[in-house]
Amino acid sequence: MDATRSIEEALEQFGQDFAARFDAATSEQTLRDEKASVLGKKGKLTEILKLMGKVPAEDRRRIGEQVNALKDAVESRFEARLEALRRQRREAELNAPPFDLSMPPRLLAPRGHRHPLSQTQDDLLAIFRDLGFLSVEGPEVELEENNFTKLAFPPDHPATDMQDTFWVDVQGAPSGARTLLRTHTSAVQVREMSSRPPPMAIVSSGAVYRRDDDITHSPMFHQVEGFLVDRRVTFGHLKAVLDAFATRLYGPGTRTRFRPSYFPFVEPGAEVDVSCVFCGGQGCRVCKQTGWIEILGCGMIHPAVFEQCGLDPEAYSGFAFGLGVDRIAMLRYGINDIRLLYENAPRFLTQF
Ligand code: FA5
């Protein structure tokens, strides 16, 4: 058989084969592989063209045209098959069950949550905001006068002692002023009463510091402070607000008890107990068989404090209260050692 004849037969056979192979490809990748095996450097057509050298000159042009026509046929068959495969894939997607967008994602890392102290603090603040109190913040590094002097602490009061208070040096503090880590949030009373006109109902919370350290006392802990100043405010208003607070915190039926107590910046002053949330007042281990749990200190703002803040004690009266957030959180979650709240051990924190 001469070269022209055998190349023509090969081309004919090739023309029949490649179309079937393209049609059999079921993915874009296999289709592209098939195309490469036809037109590529080591492809079938390249193989056939190696015979060209043996074809007599007068047949070459004709054979060349056949080869070019075949190449065009390969390209257009490839494009058509590619388009068909893409259409099929799109239709399959459209007919498949829809994605469930509401399905929760798989989490790569366990999701965290707010610290039990933050949760408690947020809940306490929310109660007072609902009762109409404006929430403000005060600094943790304070002037002695805001923390003690203007709150009518005498200069030799034991709380001001080095044994009880963390005194700090602050660059840029007014000359002669002493600075400390605030020992209570009552300093916020001084800041607000000195800077805004009554009436005001304000709540504030944050970290405070004392030289304490045992299972119920931590060197850093948290307080919520509330106070209200207006004309003709009475102890009755204070009781009503704290009763409403206790009911919202511990549920209907919770009773409060006011016991006389002393704080230099209030007169009269009181400690407030709530009926034990664990035994309902019957007496249990938590309330040490008394039926009551102490939760805060409060009182009517002392006239001397109004004077220190530039308010007329004859014109205005007001009440204030302060409570320990850590203590409320310990009661709420049954935590018996305050230090657990500050160790940040995951095995502890994940329980809340
Ligand atoms: C005060 O700090 C007053 N400023 C509260 C106040 C405000 C009274 C307004 C009147 C008017 P006291 O020192 O009792 O009061 O502290 C309040 C609460 O903070 C305590 O009942 C207790 O729950 C909590 N507390 C005190 N020291 C610590 C401590 N070291 N660790 C954890 N909680 C503490």
Image (cartoon, rainbow, N blue to C red):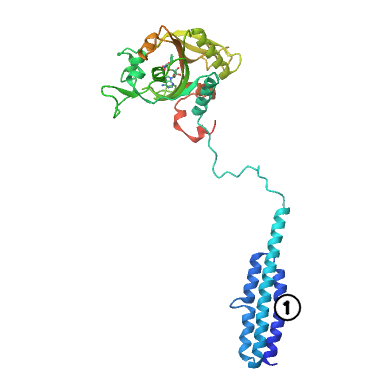
Q: Residue at x 38, y 12 (%)?
A: 305
Q: Residue at x 56, y 15 (%)?
A: 244
User: Position of 212 compared to 20: left or right?
Assistant: left
Quadrant for residue 90, please give it.
Answer: bottom right
> Which residue is situated farthest in the left direction here?
176
Residue 311 position, x and y percent, is: 39, 12
> Which residue is situated farthest in the front direction here?
197
Q: Quadrant of the N terminus?
A: bottom right
Between 240 and 77, the residue placed more toward the observer is 77
Residue 51 position, x and y percent, is: 63, 87
71 over 320 or under it: above or below: below
Secondary structure at numbered mark 1: helix
**Which residue is the site of mark 1?**
16
**Residue type (three-letter) at the residue carrying disc 1:** Gln
Between 102 and 112, the residue placed more toward the observer is 102
Between 83 and 275, the residue placed more toward the observer is 83
- Residue 274 visible, this angle: no
Quadrant for residue 60, please give it.
Answer: bottom right
Residue 135 position, x and y percent, is: 48, 23
Q: Residue at x 57, y 18 (%)?
A: 248
Between 349 and 169, the residue placed more toward the observer is 169
